Amino acid sequence: MSLSNFFKINLPYGIKRDNNGHWAAFNREYKPLGENDNFKSFSDGDFVYTNYGKLSDKLLMQLADGPTSVHMDENNVITKVFFYDDATNPSNHSEYDTKLWDNYFEKLRILSNQKVK
């Protein structure tokens, strides 16, 4: 699948945690932001991970689209958070849906307030 619009290519679909507890954003195809080349494979080293310290589970759940929009490891540590799904993706709606956009940008606002350690 090739990404076809600015939103899906350049804005975060979610964030993922590495083994050091640092976080990186990924786009709708799980690629680094700005990437949409289906013929190129990306490794974990292609992502920009940032140390925000310990992001609380409460904060991560605020960012998630819902309880099923988080992945956890075998120790119940949240490793991936999805900000939206196909039904709540604001760019999937032909009419401007203020609520979906507001919800999405509120998640980015919350994440943007996290300080780098």
Image (tube, helix red, strand yellow):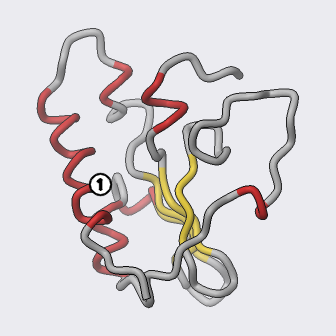
Q: Amino acid at mark 1?
A: Leu
Residue 63, x across and y down, in percent: 32, 61
Q: Residue at x 69, y 83 (%)?
A: 19
Residue 109, x across and y down, in percent: 22, 58
Classify mark 1: helix, strand or loop: helix
Considering every residue shown, the one lying at the far top of the view is: 94
Question: In the rendered image, which quarter is residue 112 located in?
Answer: bottom left
Q: Residue at x 32, y 65 (%)?
A: 111
The quadrant in which the C terminus is found is bottom left
In the displayed structure, would residue 107 be above or below residue 77? above
Q: Residue at x 75, y 56 (%)?
A: 46
- Residue that mark 1 sits on: 108
Question: Between 98 and 53, which is closer to the camera in this rendering?
Answer: 53
- The reply, left or right, for residue 105 in relation to residue 30 is left
Considering every residue shown, the one lying at the far left of the view is: 98
Question: Between 104 and 33, which is closer to the camera in this rendering?
Answer: 33
The quadrant in which the N terminus is found is top right
In the displayed structure, would residue 1 be above or below residue 107? above
Residue 27, x across and y down, in percent: 56, 42
Question: In the rendered image, which quarter is residue 11 located in?
Answer: top left
Number of labels in the image equals 1
Q: Residue at x 43, y 29 (%)?
A: 7
Residue 65, x across and y down, in percent: 34, 52
